């Protein structure tokens, strides 16, 4: 059974960089796409972007200038970095497997941007 | 970017009733690459339907998806108590992937 687990600080200061890691277990990180999706409190879902295990990426244009998604195949991890955060980046961040539809999700981690 | 508009915003129904949820796209969804998810409070979304009409593994057959082009529908034939939740549609035929704003199905 594939399991995804997000980890990282639950609090980020404005203008700083948010960094999260997704650890994959029960399945291989190879030959798969890994995506990040976020959900502000009480709002809808927003696609952030994805990475293929080989390193190719696609990002949401609305976030592209601030986002970096990377993959570490040796540790079965995907990472998300979002720079210059503001309060608008406060959200639950999910990692998922796939580039289109998403069957496997992490439980999500809430990141609050506040000074 | 394809904008997905879900209607209604809230659907108030009783257990055993039929639920019909709509998702309309601002432009054609390539290959009808449209998915539906169910989300309960404090939980990650759960994939119900992909490819507009294919049920995901483990999804009961009371859930069905239909539609093509710009108009898609999720139907729950007979609501069970566990079906009261928020439902999201998502297109993956174009980049960026986009989601609708969600429809809440609540108990009447």
Image (tube, grey):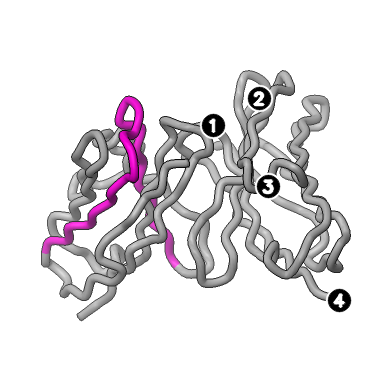
Q: Give percent across and percent down for residue B69.
A: 25, 34
Residue depth check, mark 2 versus mark 4: number of the one nearer the observer: 4
| Residue bounds of the magenta highlight | B18-40
How far apart marks 4 and 1 lie (CA) works out to 34 Å
Mark 2 vs mark 3: in front: 3
Which residue is disc 1 drawn over? A99
Q: Quadrant for the C terminus of chain A, please.
A: bottom right
Residue shown at the point (55%, 52%) measured from the top left: A46
10 Å crowding of disc 4: few (<14), some (14-19), many (20+)? few
Find numbered disc 1 in the image and state the secondary structure of the residue it sits on: loop
Residue B25 location (% of width, % of height): 32, 45
Task: Check disc 4 and report the residue beneath it.
Answer: A115
Q: Measure the C-alpha gap from mark 2 to mark 3.
A: 18 Å
Q: Secondary structure at mark 4?
A: loop
| 3 vs 1, front mark | 3
Which mark is first along the chain, 3 or 2?
2
Going from the N terminus, do you reach mark 2 or mark 4 first? 2
Quarter of the image where one finds residue B7: bottom left
Q: Position of residue B41 (x, y in %)?
A: 47, 69
According to the image, label 2 marks what residue?
Answer: A52
Above or below, comparing residue B53 to residue B48 in the picture: above
Chain name for mark 3:
A
């Amino acid at each position: 059974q594939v399991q995804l687990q997000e980890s990282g600080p639950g609090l980020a200061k404005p203008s700083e960089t948010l960094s999260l890691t997704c650890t994959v277990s029960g399945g291989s990180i190879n030959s798969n796409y890994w995506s990040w999706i976020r959900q502000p409190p009480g709002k809808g879902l927003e696609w952030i972007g994805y990475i293929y295990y080989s390193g190719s990426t696609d990002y949401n244009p609305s976030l592209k200038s601030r986002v970096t998604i990377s993959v570490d195949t040796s540790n079965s991890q995907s990472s998300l970095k979002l720079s210059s955060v503001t309060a608008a980046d406060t959200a639950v961040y999910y990692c998922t497997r796939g580039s289109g539809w998403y069957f496997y999700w992490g439980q999500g981690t809430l990141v609050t941007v506040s000074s | 970017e394809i904008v997905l508009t879900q209607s209604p915003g809230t659907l108030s129904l009783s257990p055993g009733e039929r639920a019909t949820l709509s998702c309309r796209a601002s432009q054609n969804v390539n290959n009808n690459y449209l998915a539906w998810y169910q989300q309960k409070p404090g939980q990650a979304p759960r994939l119900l339907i992909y490819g507009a009409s294919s049920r995901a593994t483990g999804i009961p057959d009371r859930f069905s998806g239909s539609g093509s082009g710009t108009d898609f529908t999720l139907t729950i034939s007979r609501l069970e108590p566990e079906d009261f939740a928020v439902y999201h549609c998502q297109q993956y035929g174009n980049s960026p992937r986009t989601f609708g704003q969600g429809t809440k199905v609540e108990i009447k």
